[in-house]
C-alpha cells in the first residue's frame, strides 16, 4: 500500500499527528533523536522541510538519520526542487496556491520532476494554502495571505484543490504563528471537501491541538514544539492521545 493510501486509511479512524522537522533548525543527530521520540509518542509520520534551507545535503543527512532512528515514514515537505532527497519515503508534491511566484505554484515542480521519477519517490499531491500571519513561509513564499476571517476564500481554495485532483489539502498559519488558523475556518473547509485536511502552524499545546481535531482536522502538524518542549516525550504523547480521542 502506498504511504498516501495508508495515511488516508488511518485518518478515517482517528485524527493523526505528523511531526515536522526542519533540517535548518537542528543537527541531523538531534533530528534523529526527535524522530525517535515522535515515534514513541505515537506520531504517524515525519515531515522534513523548511523555508530557509540552503543545501540538499542538509536534507539528505537529516532524512538518513531519521530513517536509521525510527520506522516512521519520512515525507518531504519541500520548498523547492533543490531540496529533494532520494532517501525519503515520499514527498508532498505540493502547490503553494496563493503564492504570487509561479515557482512555488508549478515551476519548481517542473524542475524537480525528472529527479523524482529517476529515484522513484512516491508523490503525494497537496494543495497548500497559507493563512495570516503566514510567518517566514508566507514571506519566503511571496504569498497573498488569506485573511484569518476570510473563510469563503479558504473554502474556495480547498474545493479547487480537490477538483484539481489533489489528494490532500493543507491549511497553514506559518511555523511559529502566535495563533493557528481559526476553528471556524477548519470546520468550514472540512465540511466542504472530501479529501483529508491537514492543519498546522502555531499549534503549541494540547488544548489547541484538540480544538483543531474537534473542528475537523484529519492531520495535525507540529514543528516548533518539537524543538522547544522540555519534556517532549510526555507532552507529545499527551497531545497525540488528545487528538485521537
Ligand atoms: C509549519 O505548520 C507547520 O509548516 C508547523 O508549525 O512550527 O508552528 O508547529 P509550528
Image (cartoon, helix red, strand yellow):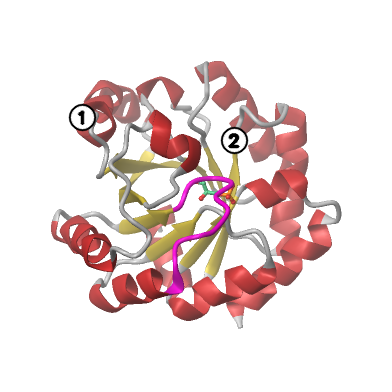
* Span of residues in magenta: 173-183
Q: State which quarter of the image contains the C terminus.
A: bottom right
Which of 94/183 is in front?
183
Dot 2 alpha-carbon crowd within 10 angstroms: few under 14, some 14 to 19, many 20 or more:
many
Which residue sits furthest bottom?
Answer: 245
Which of 84/115 is in front?
84
The residue located at (73%, 27%) in the rendering is 27
The residue located at (66%, 31%) in the rendering is 25
Give residue 58's quadrant in the image.
Answer: top right
Q: Main secondary structure of the magenta part?
A: loop
Q: Horizontally, is 144 left or right of 239 in the view?
A: left
Q: Horizontally, is 164 left or right of 94 in the view?
A: left
Instruction: Give the Cα separation between the discs numbered 1 and 2.
Output: 23 Å
Q: Can residue 169 be seen at all in this image of the molecule? A: yes
| Label 2: element kind | loop
Q: Which residue is mark 1?
A: 102
Q: Are marks 1 and 2 in contact (CB under 8 Å)?
A: no
Above or below 99: residue 126: below
Mark number displayed over residue 22:
2
Above or below 154: residue 47: above
Q: Earlier in the sequence, mark 1 or mark 2?
A: 2
Residue 87 screen position, x and y as percent: 53, 31
Which of 110/135 is in front?
135
Residue 182 screen position, x and y as percent: 44, 68
Which of 35/53 is in front?
53
Amino acid at each position: 500500500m502506498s504511504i498516501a493510501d495508508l495515511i488516508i486509511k488511518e485518518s478515517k479512524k482517528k485524527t493523526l499527528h505528523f511531526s515536522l522537522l526542519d533540517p535548518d533548525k537542528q543537527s541531523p543527530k538531534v533530528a534523529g533523536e526527535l524522530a525517535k521520540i515522535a515515534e514513541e509518542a505515537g506520531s504517524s509520520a515525519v515531515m522534513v522541510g523548511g523555508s530557509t534551507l540552503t543545501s540538499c545535503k542538509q536534507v539528505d543527512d537529516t532524512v538518513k538519520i531519521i530513517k536509521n532512528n525510527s520506522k516512521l515514514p519520512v515525507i518531504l515537505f519541500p520548498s523547492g526542487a533543490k531540496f529533494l532527497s532520494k532517501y525519503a519515503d515520499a514527498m508532498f508534491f505540493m502547490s503553494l496556491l496563493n503564492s504570487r511566484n509561479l515557482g512555488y505554484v508549478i515551476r519548481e515542480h517542473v524542475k524537480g520532476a525528472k529527479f523524482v521519477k529517476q529515484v522513484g519517490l512516491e508523490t503525494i499531491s497537496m494543495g497548500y494554502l497559507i493563512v495570516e500571519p503566514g510567518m517566514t513561509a508566507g514571506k519566503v513564499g511571496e504569498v497573498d495571505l488569506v485573511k484569518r476571517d476570510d473563510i469563503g476564500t479558504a473554502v474556495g481554495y480547498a474545493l479547487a484543490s480537490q477538483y484539481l485532483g489533489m489528494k490532500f489539502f493543507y491549511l497553514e498559519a506559518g511555523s511559529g504563528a502566535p495563533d493557528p488558523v481559526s476553528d471556524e475556518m477548519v470546520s468550514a473547509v472540512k465540511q466542504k471537501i472530501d479529501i483529508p485536511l491537514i492543519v498546522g502552524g502555531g499549534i503549541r499545546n494540547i488544548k489547541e491541538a484538540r480544538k483543531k481535531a474537534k473542528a475537523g482536522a484529519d492531520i495535525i502538524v507540529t514543528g516548533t514544539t518539537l524543538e522547544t518542549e522540555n519534556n517532549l516525550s510526555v507532552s507529545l504523547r499527551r497531545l497525540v492521545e488528545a487528538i485521537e480521542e
